[in-house]
Image (spheres, helix red, strand yellow):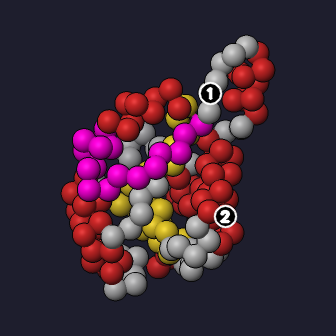
Amino acid sequence: MPALYSTITDLIDPAWIYLTGSPWQLYSMLHDFIHTEFSASTGPILMKNLTYTGVEGLLEFLAEGTSLEYKAGRINDIHAWYPEKMYLGIGDSSGYDPEVYAYAYRQYGPEWMKCIWIHVVEEGNNTDARWEEAFKGIPETAYYLYTDPEELNPAALAEGACF
């Protein structure tokens, strides 16, 4: 993936935003990983706030809901911050990335969420039923499910296509 991200950076010079449902206590580790392995594609890391100052802090963290709800909320924030930018959603099937990026596509349209690339990983829910539900109403030309990053064609992005 680092080579793929580097190629994307070279081709279209995107602004990278990393969205994760992990708590901010893991920020240092994730920051170091991104700056070491993905040095050509660094950017802000949006993480859940887990501040435990008592029961109230824990309840606030739990009130943020599932990773799906949290990420959808952050997608709304990103859209509010950068409504004129175009995005490529890159994620995997182990969590809610397909549903989150599909939500962004439906909510803000293909002008904002141009493409969705989902890495199909062994530990993910990779059923046809999931893909049908997640991508209902989204053209097949707007998302791509892959098992090997070598399958991807980042040059297509520079030409305005997804793959």
Front residue (pair 51, 144)? 51
Residue located 31% across and 38% down the image: 33
**Residue type for callout 2:** Ala
Judging from the image, what secondary structure is the residue with disc 1 in?
loop
Residue 13 drawn in magenta: no
Residue located 27% across and 74% down the image: 11
Question: Is there any visible trace of residue 98 in the rendered image?
Answer: yes
Residue furthest toward the bottom? 159
Residue located 73% across and 13% down the image: 54
Q: Is residue 36 above or below residue 153?
A: above
Lateral position of residue 108 relative to residue 35, left or right: right
Image quadrant holding the C terminus, namely bottom left
Front residue (pair 88, 80)? 80
Whichever of callouts 1 and 2 sits on the residue coming sooner in the sequence is: 1
Quarter of the figure with residue 14 = bottom left
Q: Which residue is mark 1?
A: 50
Lateral position of residue 68 relative to residue 46, left or right: right
